[in-house]
Amino acid sequence: MPAPNTASRANAPEAPIFAIIASATDLACELLDVLCREAEALAAMRLEAPKGFAETKNRLVVAYSYVLEELQETPLAPGTDAALARLKALNTDVMTAARSNAAALEGALEANRRMLDIVIKAMDRQRAPTTVGYGRVGNRSASPRRTPASASVLMTRTL
């Protein structure tokens, strides 16, 4: 009977850690790609873009977090130093892109708020008619002024 292959048994504990590192690396690359594409879309003022990226980003972030937790719980094996160093560098890039992406999203949100404020102010100016008031002796006042909407109801009830 041949002797059992001890070399494959010695490598068996390494397989899970390398698979986890490979999975984390793949997810980090995907997440980095999505963050960069979203930032580019926001820079091009395509403000509808975040809706399209949100679900993908959420899915990738959850999966990436799960794989990183799994990586922390898995014992290290010899020969993982280089792969872990690449993953750490990639993780730094993902975090930098995430911060940049968050700033771009906040900027887009602020731009939307400012635009809505401008539209609302313009609508208020068009909607609010100016009325001419009367002075003490019954003559029209020299300067037009705004009368609140409740004033017409008030005048009807008093008359």
Image (tube, grey):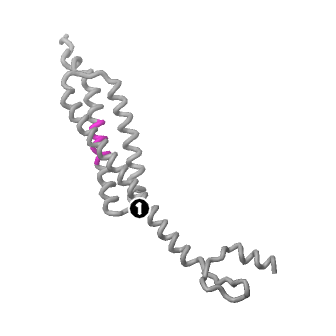
Please tell me which residue is depicted at 30% across the width and 47% down the height of the picture. Answer: 97
Asked whether, in this view, residue 56 is left or right of residue 28, the answer is: right
Asked whether, in this view, residue 22 is left or right of residue 126, the answer is: left
Q: Quadrant of the N terminus?
A: top left
Viewer-proximal residue, 156 or 11? 156
Q: Position of residue 85 (x, y in %)?
A: 21, 32
Please tell me which residue is depicted at 31% across the width and 63% down the height of the picture. Answer: 44
Q: Quadrant of residue 27?
A: top left
The answer to whether residue 102 is magenta is no
Please tell me which residue is depicted at 25% across the width and 39% down the height of the picture. Answer: 90
Write down the residue under mark 1: 111
Asked whether, in this view, residue 86 is left or right of residue 51, the answer is: left
Q: Amino acid at mark 1?
A: Ala
The single residue placed furthest to the front in the displayed view is: 137
Q: Quadrant of residue 133?
A: bottom right
Magenta: main secondary structure: helix
Q: Quadrant of residue 125?
A: bottom right
Q: Secondary structure at mark 1?
A: helix
The single residue placed furthest to the bottom in the displayed view is: 139
Magenta stretch bounds: 23-32
Please tell me which residue is depicted at 49% across the width and 70% down the height of the picture. Answer: 119
Viewer-proximal residue, 51 or 153? 153
Residue 33 lies, with reference to residue 159, above or below; the image says above
Q: Position of residue 14 (x, y in %)?
A: 24, 23
Residue 89 lies, with reference to residue 153, above or below; the image says above
Q: Position of residue 81 (x, y in %)?
A: 20, 27
Viewer-proximal residue, 68 or 140? 140
Viewer-proximal residue, 94 or 121? 121
